[in-house]
Amino acid sequence: MNWYLQSGKEADVVLSTRIRYARNLQEFRFNMKRKEEIEAFLEKVKEETPEIGYGLKFLKLKDMDKATLISLVEKNLISPEFALNKQKNGAILLNDEENICIMINEEDHIRLQVFNCGLDLEGTYNLAKELDKKIENIFNIAKSKKYGYLTSCPTNVGTGIRASVMVHLPGLTKTGNIRKILESINSFGMNIRGVYGEKSEVSGDMYQISNKVTLGISEEKIVKNLRAITEKIIEQERLARKYLGNNQIELEDKVYRSFGILTNSRKISSEETRKLLSDVKLGTDMGIITELTDSKISKLYLYTKPANLEKYVGEELDSYDRDIKRAEVIKRIINEN
Amino acid sequence: MNWYLQSGKEADVVLSTRIRYARNLQEFRFNMKRKEEIEAFLEKVKEETPEIGYGLKFLKLKDMDKATLISLVEKNLISPEFALNKQKNGAILLNDEENICIMINEEDHIRLQVFNCGLDLEGTYNLAKELDKKIENIFNIAKSKKYGYLTSCPTNVGTGIRASVMVHLPGLTKTGNIRKILESINSFGMNIRGVYGEKSEVSGDMYQISNKVTLGISEEKIVKNLRAITEKIIEQERLARKYLGNNQIELEDKVYRSFGILTNSRKISSEETRKLLSDVKLGTDMGIITELTDSKISKLYLYTKPANLEKYVGEELDSYDRDIKRAEVIKRIINEN
């Protein structure tokens, strides 16, 4: 089963961990514009793919149908900008487990990414580092004695590493303590940003925390800092949930009403689904809702996203029919064994 | 089973029928104030109760506990004003089926009422007339050659009859056609009034239709007119539902979301319950919701009202606990066989 359908460590708060390296090849320019140059670059990567190993396959974005391409964005395997701007001349290296996804010709030549469910900064980092070494053995990676790894955008220069975790913070959101957390995290050299839905509202209480600085600090220190911050947030979130739990009836009422709407609607938007799922996940994680499992919740999160919904049902759908089908799929997933 | 837990004719629109007669005794004054006079009057009625028959029992309001008294109001067996103003010196004659309830020392000396579920103006009228004759044989009823039956308030003088039906009009409400209906009914010599909940909003799309005029028109004609108007409204309401049914998914979504909230909440107000029940009844009547029966819906309507809820669970409750208990009772009724 793919990592994004599983639940890992500290799954009540941490949905996933990602390590990303930004790497560039010496013999190609940053931000290539000429078609021939890009073609030559892609060809080189394609040739070397078997050498990298890990079951990675070279896939051009332009060979994918729209639903497949967007489904990768929805799984956070590729950035929306990459899918949009490089649909003609971008590529990825992807394995079957989809825990490794390397974007080729994104902002940097190579954006190596390793994923895992739950909180797994060490494991994810170790695999990413191993993979990065392999890549450095195969390609001539642009590096400077003074700055470290050179990148297209100066914010990534140095280690080129970006470590991030996706966290679910309904407790801190409902108690209103999220604002304090957002402010304090910034002062620890970390970024925290809400995963925005429509109308720039944070969608389903999901936040991504990642390191701000990549230069003048070791990779190990970056990963260690993020781990410390994440553990602090887990602790705060659990305290907030405990506080909410003091008014058990209010909480039960809230999460079960959301569960009732989610399981009874006949048409439902992606946005509303995420909001309701946030309550339902909270209820399940707190042992209030007993009808669901972690794995069903992961499935619900994934297969209610527009493109993954289309792939799940195997049909192209307009927006109206998608809302109807989404309500059906929710019921199907909840009722399956 | 009591009539208010059953469903009768045209039950998809008409919940109940009521015939009421206002009668006064010659030897007592309208609007008695003196305690001794009232006592003498009540004593007289009590003595004659066995003679009236129909299994009627004489019950003083002051001998009832608060929940019992209010539960009668919630069943529409007595008026809220009667329960409030005459709790010390009012009485009722009530049978076990509770389809006959005679208010004693209300605005008039005797307010004879007969009820049935669904649309049953003829049956209800016949029983009320039979009962009225019996009462007229036993008591000296105040009557004038010119005006007919004399009543405390001139709006009831003449026949003293008030025929009414309680109708559920979610279709006309949702399509916005209710306003036209409200206006046109008035011009036919009938009153239609919403059963108000909080904030003077019509509660759960329930309306009561009754005759405006009691003088210069025969009882039979009054009943016949109300029947004609009610049949017209039933027709219009069914047309409105058919129209709503053209957008089947929207309608299913609406009624099932309400069903989902109703069956999953952990605390719920009386007001919200009535709103949700209106959708759920509509869904059931239209064959969309298959989880419920007419009889369960009648039970839900009755036992979620504050005083009937307390009687159902056999406990006195404060408002907060009542909302919690209400959510439990809803689940219990829905899940029972």
Image (cartoon, coloured by chain):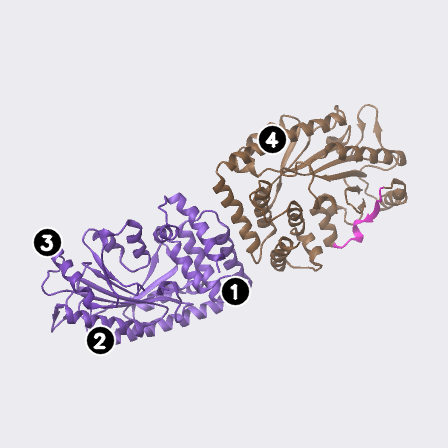
Chain colours: A purple, B brown
Which amino acid type corresponds to the residue marked 1 in the rendered image? Answer: Ile
Report whether mark 1 lies on the same chain as mark 4. Answer: no
Which subunit holds the residue at mark 1?
Answer: A
In the depicted view, which residue is nearer to us: A59 or A21? A59
Magenta stretch encompasses residue B74: no
Question: Which of pointers 3 and 1 indicates the residue nearer the eye?
Answer: 3
Which subunit holds the residue at mark 2?
Answer: A
Mark 1 element type: loop
Q: Which residue is mark 3?
A: A36
Query: Mark 4 touching mark 2, by CB under 8 A?
Result: no
Which amino acid type corresponds to the residue marked 4 in the rendered image? Answer: Glu
Q: Position of residue A321 (x, y in %)?
A: 40, 44
Query: Mark 1 touching mark 4, by CB under 8 A?
Result: no
Give the magenta part as a residue range.
Answer: B54-65
For residue B198, say whether it is visible: no
Query: Local crowd at mark 2 within 10 Å, few (<14), some, or many (≥20)?
Result: few
Q: Which residue is mark 4?
A: B235
Q: CA distance from mark 1 to mark 4?
A: 46 Å
Mark 3 element type: helix
Q: CA distance from mark 4 to mark 2?
A: 78 Å
